[in-house]
Image (spheres, rainbow, N blue to C red):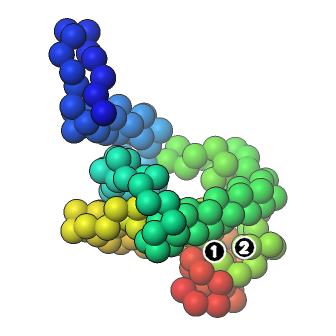
């Protein structure tokens, strides 16, 4: 797989992966720059998780559709599909939290500025369906091409996502108070009834 750059010299797959990493990383920095200035924010750790997932996705790109019915590929597809379900359910309901200007924290993305605690639907079982979605995505990407590099990246992304959720919980306790503490007692972090 090669492409031609302006000089007419074929660009290797590795060069394209590095270029894609730089471009996507710059986009993530642009999206997260407020969070990167606030190290204790959940957005800071979420950025690090994205930065661990990105090279894993790029490293596994060449094997994305190789042997699509192999056992590891099937596991990967199931995790990726579940990731989309978690994401869809989480995004649909987060709007019920009435995002608004009341939460003036610049490190929060617009849809994260919820002023009402959402405890229905998937949020009635888990506190972080969007981060749960990213966990499923992480391990779905890992199973596309299992090796030592992708395992380290998946483990890092997982650790950063757990740190993201913990920081988000601190922020929610600060904003919602006792109501959020009670909510934490009734729900799991990422997977209903388990974790």
Element on which disc 1 rests: loop
Q: Quadrant of residue 154?
A: bottom left
Locate residue 161, reporting x and y percent: 43, 67
Q: Residue at x 50, y 72 (%)?
A: 75
Reply above or below: 51 against 159. Answer: above
The image quadrant that residue 177 belongs to is bottom right
Q: Label 2: state its secondary structure.
A: helix
Residue 123 — which label? 2
Q: Are marks 2 and 1 in contact (CB under 8 Å)?
A: yes
The residue lying at 78 percent from left, 61 percent from top is: 93
- Tell me which residue sits at (65%, 78%) in the image: 126
Q: Position of residue 35 (x, y in %)?
A: 43, 48
Cα distance, mark 2 to mark 1?
6 Å
Q: Which residue is mark 1?
A: 127
Mark 2 surroundings within 10 Å by alpha-carbon count, few (fewer than 14), some (14 through 19), many (20 or more): many
Q: Foreground: 60 or 34?
A: 60
Q: Is residue 97 visible?
A: no
Query: Does the rendering let one see residue 68?
Result: yes
């Amino acid at each position: 797989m090669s492409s031609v750059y302006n000089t007419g010299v074929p660009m290797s797959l590795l060069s394209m992966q590095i270029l894609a990493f730089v471009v996507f990383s710059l986009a993530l920095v642009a999206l997260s720059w407020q969070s990167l200035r606030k190290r204790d924010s959940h957005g800071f750790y979420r950025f690090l998780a994205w930065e661990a997932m990105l090279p894993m996705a790029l490293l596994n790109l060449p094997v994305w559709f190789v042997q699509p019915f192999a056992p590891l590929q099937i596991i990967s597809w199931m995790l990726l599909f579940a990731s989309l379900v978690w994401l869809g359910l989480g995004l649909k309901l987060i709007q019920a939290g009435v995002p608004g200007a009341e939460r003036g924290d610049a490190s929060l993305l617009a849809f994260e500025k919820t002023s009402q605690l959402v405890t229905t639907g998937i949020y009635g079982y888990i506190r972080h369906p969007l981060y749960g979605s990213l966990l499923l995505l992480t391990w779905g990407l890992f199973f596309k091409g299992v090796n030592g590099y992708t395992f380290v990246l998946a483990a890092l992304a997982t650790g950063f996502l757990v740190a993201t959720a913990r920081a988000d919980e601190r922020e929610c306790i600060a904003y919602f108070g006792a109501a959020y503490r009670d909510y934490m007692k009734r729900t799991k972090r990422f997977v209903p009834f388990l974790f």
